[in-house]
Image (cartoon, grey):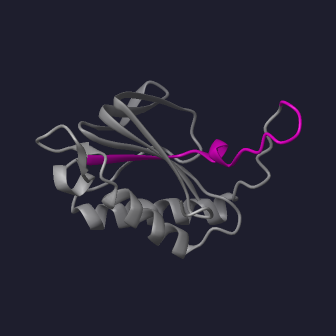
Amino acid sequence: MRLVIQRVSRASVTVEGELKASIGNGLMVLVGVENGDTQEDVKWLVGKTVALRIFDDENGVMNRSIHDVGGEVLAVSQFTLTASTRKGNRPSYIRAAGHDIAIPLYEEYCDQIANALGVPTQKGVFGADMKVELINNGPVTIIIDSKLKE
């Protein structure tokens, strides 16, 4: 699984002109699920997401986690994170997991984040043509891949 985590002042998802989810201060997380991903990938990524110290403390140093600041999370499924650009100029999405694997793992990620933070995870609409808006605060953007574990 791959995540793109952005520290945001606010973020929202709209589908066909209808607001589906929005958050204030917190994390906008794009979630890409690949073939072969498992519950262990979810567990590891949830731990990283809630523990990342990317929010400023009283001295302006990134030393606080989403949990520490009481922030919100908006998670959006995004199969394009699995893209391979090795050959040619058209990305290949052959590594993207099918709905039967991707939906349960995405939902599990969202549920575990909610449990860890004690607040519901706001979500995009799986498979929909979404319009995602955000104000990246910093900007702070972190990419995490459960296969690389770096």
Q: Count the labels in the image.
A: 0
Q: Position of residue 23 (x, y in %)?
A: 28, 39
Tell me the residue at 54%/65% (across/down). Answer: 105
In the foreground, 109 or 138: 138
The extreme bottom residue here reads: 40
Vertical order, 98 against 54 (above or below): below
Q: Is residue 120 above or below residue 18?
A: below
Would residue 85 be counted in the magenta stretch?
yes
Is 146 displayed left or right of 43 in the figure? Answer: right
Q: Residue at x 68, y 49 (%)?
A: 82
User: In the rendered image of this protein, does residue 53 appear above or below residue 47?
Assistant: above
Q: Which residues are magenta?
A: 72-89
Q: Report the front residue among 115 and 71.
A: 71
Percent across and percent down for residue 137 are 31, 30
Q: Which residue lies at the image location 61% right of the left edge and 61% below the top edge?
A: 148
Residue 18 lies, in percent from the top left, at 40, 29
| Residue at the farthest left position | 58
Nearer to me, 50 or 119: 50
Q: Position of residue 62 (x, y in %)?
A: 26, 44
Q: Could you tell me which quadrant the N terminus lies in? A: bottom right
Residue 97 vs residue 137: left or right?
A: right
